[in-house]
Amino acid sequence: MEHKNEAMTSSKLNKPQICTELAEVDVASVWKGIRHAAIETAAKEPYLRPLLDDVVISRNCLAESLATRLARRLARADMQRSELELLLSDLLLKNPKIVTMAASDMIAIVDRDAACSSFLEPLLFYKGFLAISTYRISHLLWNQDRKELAHYFQSIVSEVFGADIHPAARIGCGILLDHATSVVIGETSIIENNVSILHEVTLGGTGKITGDRHPIVRSGVLIGAGSKILGRVEIGECAKIGAGSVVLADVPAHTTVAGVPAVVIGKSERNPAIDMSLSLCERYQSLSEANAI
């Protein structure tokens, strides 16, 4: 099944734009791709047949399938799988926007992750996808004033998938959480559409300040592994954060920053989040090599 990168959303306004592209997401095609891959995999790998039957082949739609997969991964003594699956299915079937956002995230993974060959893989194996999908459910619960249950899911996701995403954070669609291990996204963080975030990234505060205290990440941003973005700073559209950087100030759009603290080292690619190029500009690499001698 062919996939084409979606055009980046141009965010010219100060107000963060969240999920303006959902109308373009073909959930039925994503579900068809998942079922096709599941049937093929079940035929050639019998040890996975029970899992594939339960999660995909016996299900009628992506909402049911996602609810089943999350229930299998998140169930524990204080909330059994059967109870959890009923809750998640009810929430997803009644709120199809969450399912559409999940499909958008799957498209992002297949398009950007060279290791991913089908929509089935994120559903079965990618804890970044499963973590953000659970966050989307907890975010819905948070907005329904079911904050205790939202916090419950946040804590389980942190334990099971190694990513801590506050349910009040605002996260757009087309998100790639690559690996997701040790990713932390604080309460007032805002992440727009088509953003790629690698492992060990923190979108955090700077202390005990209340109110809006976490970063705003505009569309098209690529955040390298181990980066820490702290405080109410704004990462401009299509910017790139070098791995291991500590960002304490606003980052202009279409620039690359790196270092501790991070400084501008050059322009970024046209679509860093989609291009997934983690290399830094030639001038910075030359300086780094010279300093290492």
Image (tube, rainbow, N blue to C red):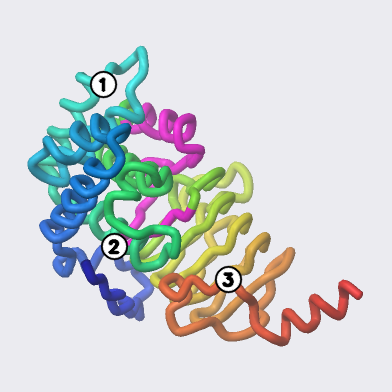
Q: CA distance from mark 1 to mark 3?
A: 39 Å
Image height of 93 relative to 9, above or below? above
- Looking at the rendering, which quadrant does residue 140 occupy? top left
Residue underneath mark 3? 278
Magenta-colored stretch includes residue 176? yes
Looking at the image, which residue is at 16% across and 46% down? 62
Q: Which badge, 1 or 2, comes first in the chain's sequence?
A: 1
- State the residue in front, 200 or 253: 200
Q: Which residues are magenta?
A: 150-178
- Give SS at disc 2: helix
Q: CA distance from mark 1 to mark 2?
A: 28 Å
Q: Residues within 10 Å of mark 1 (few under 14, many from 20)?
A: some
Image height of 147 relative to 44, above or below? above
Residue underneath mark 1? 81
Looking at the image, which residue is at 40% across and 67% down? 112
Taking the view exactly as shown, the residue that stands out farthest to the top is 77
